[in-house]
Structures are given as C-alpha cells and as structure tokens.
C-alpha cells in the first residue's frame, strides 16, 4: 500500500467502536497471552545490558552513600573523580545505546503486531524473526524515533498540555510503519496524525483504559507488569485494523460475498 492509498483509506475509514475494540482486545489478550509474554521477556532481557552500562560507572557513588548513610555531616558528591571528558563520553554512550535499544524494542513490538494479524485473520504470513524489522529498517526506525522524540519534546516545551494531543498520533506511528514499511518516515508521521486527529477522542479513551489495565500488574505485584504490559499493544493493533484495515481482510470479505 502506497501513501496515497493509505491516506484515502484513512479518509474513508469508519469510526471505531470503543466497546468492540476493548472486547476484541481482551479476547486476543487471552488467546495470545503466552506469545505476548515471550515478547515482553525478550525486551526486558535486552534492557539488562543497557541498565548495567548506565549504572556500573555510578556504583562507587552508591556504595559511598551506603557506607556513609549514618554520618549526619556526609555530603555526597555526584560523579566525583570522573573527568569532564569521561562524563561527556558516558552521556553520549547512554544516548546512543538508548536509540539502539529503541530500535530493537520497536522490532520486537512490530513482530508482535504481525503475529496478532495472523492470529486475528487466520493467516500464515511470514513474520520473520524478532529482529528482522530492525535488520531491514535500522536507519528508518532511528529516524522515526528521532521524529517521535522531537515532536514529544516540542509538545512538552509548550506547557505540557499539547502532550495529551500528540500522544494519540505518536501511538499510531509504529503500527502504521510496521504494516506499511515501504512508506517514507514523513508520510508515516503524516498518516499517524491524520488518523489520530480524525478519531482523537475515541483513541485517547482506548489508550487510557489500556494503559490502566497494563499498569494493574504493577499495582498487584511489581513483576506482574510483565503479564499485562503488552495488552496496550493489542488495543493499538485493533485501533489500526478497525480503521485502516488490511488488504487480506478485504479479500476475505469479497470471498465470503461470492460464496453467499
């Protein structure tokens, strides 16, 4: 699907039903629970080396704080003993690695969306590996991440209120990219805002409810977040599917009409 076809589909799309999207999302959540859990665990496993790289240089500081916790005159000096160059290199390394981690997380997220499509439509399409999308579109994912960060930063600088507005389109960027990988970054962002603006209130409500459900695992038991956090991905999948849809879905509907 090219950009013009996608924009036309968005223009002609029907308003998604709030209750229907949630109902289908819960059913799919139960159906793909083990699959979603695996994707979350892989994402967490990838994050461990990143966390170690960030915190290992800070260990002496934390150890010093613990050792002097009973001293009322102790004044911790953050990053004492590190040169300016070392601090700059560390900050740059954290910045670069955060984008690399983001690329792999988007690839895992995209793989899960493809699995959801197969499960939902009864297809047997090749989904590739967890990191196939990252391998094929590393540069594009970096650009998408930079664009998302830039938009969110500008919105945050404008007194934070616009963050609530851009939150909806930014949630749609990844599914639009995953199911339309041939499109340019500019067209992907444009399509996300076009779709997000059209059904902003419904999408905002769905994102809010799915986020609350995803956070339940954190409230019940911290580690429980692993079992609930991917629910929001399923809701976003149906937000895309029930508006833009898929060519395979249209073919199935045509076949059904011919049979009848």
Image (tube, rainbow, N blue to C red):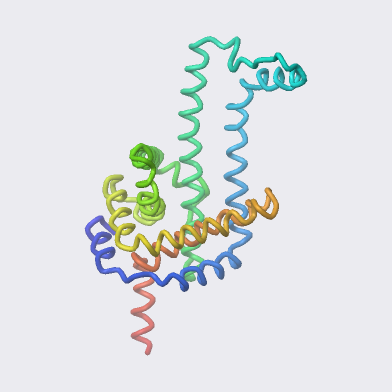
Residue 172 at least partly seen = yes
Quadrant of the frame with the C terminus: bottom left
Residue 144 at least partly seen = no
Q: Nearer the viewer, residue 3 or 24?
A: 24
- 138 in relation to 97, above or below: below
Q: Nearer the viewer, residue 167 or 117?
A: 167
Give the image location of residue 235, x and y in percent. 48, 62
Left or right: 19 as drawn, with respect to 3: right
- 164 in relation to 119, above or below: above
- Which residue is depicted at the point 57% across and 53% down? 229
User: Residue 228 appears in which quarter of the rendering?
Assistant: bottom right
User: Residue 194 appears in which quarter of the rendering?
Assistant: bottom left
User: Residue 172 appears in which quarter of the rendering?
Assistant: bottom left
Left or right: 235 as drawn, with respect to 227: left
- 229 in relation to 56, above or below: below
Quadrant of the frame with the N terminus: bottom left
């Amino acid at each position: 699907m090219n950009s013009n076809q996608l924009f036309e589909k968005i223009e002609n799309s029907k308003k998604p039903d709030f209750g229907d999207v949630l109902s289908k999302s819960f059913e799919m959540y139960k159906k793909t629970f083990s699959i979603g859990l695996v994707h979350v665990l892989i994402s967490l496993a990838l994050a461990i080396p990143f966390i170690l790289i960030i915190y290992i240089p800070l260990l002496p500081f934390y150890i010093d704080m613990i050792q002097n916790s009973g001293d009322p005159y102790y004044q911790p000096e953050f990053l004492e003993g590190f040169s300016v160059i070392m601090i700059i290199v560390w900050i740059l390394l954290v910045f670069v690695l955060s984008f690399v981690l983001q690329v792999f997380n988007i690839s895992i997220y995209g793989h899960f969306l493809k699995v959801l499509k197969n499960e939902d439509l009864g297809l047997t399409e090749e989904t590739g590996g967890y990191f196939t999308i990252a391998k094929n579109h590393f540069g594009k994912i970096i650009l998408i991440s930079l664009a998302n960060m830039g938009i969110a930063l500008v919105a945050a600088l404008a007194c934070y209120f616009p963050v609530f507005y851009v939150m909806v389109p930014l949630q749609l960027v990844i599914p639009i990219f995953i199911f339309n990988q041939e499109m340019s970054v500019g067209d992907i962002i444009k399509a996300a805002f076009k779709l997000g603006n059209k059904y902003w209130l419904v999408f905002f409500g769905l994102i809010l409810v799915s986020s609350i459900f995803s956070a339940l695992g954190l409230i019940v038991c911290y580690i429980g977040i692993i079992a609930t956090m991917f629910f929001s991905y399923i809701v976003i999948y149906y937000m895309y599917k029930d508006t833009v849809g898929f060519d395979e879905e249209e073919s199935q509907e045509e076949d059904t009409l011919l049979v009848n």
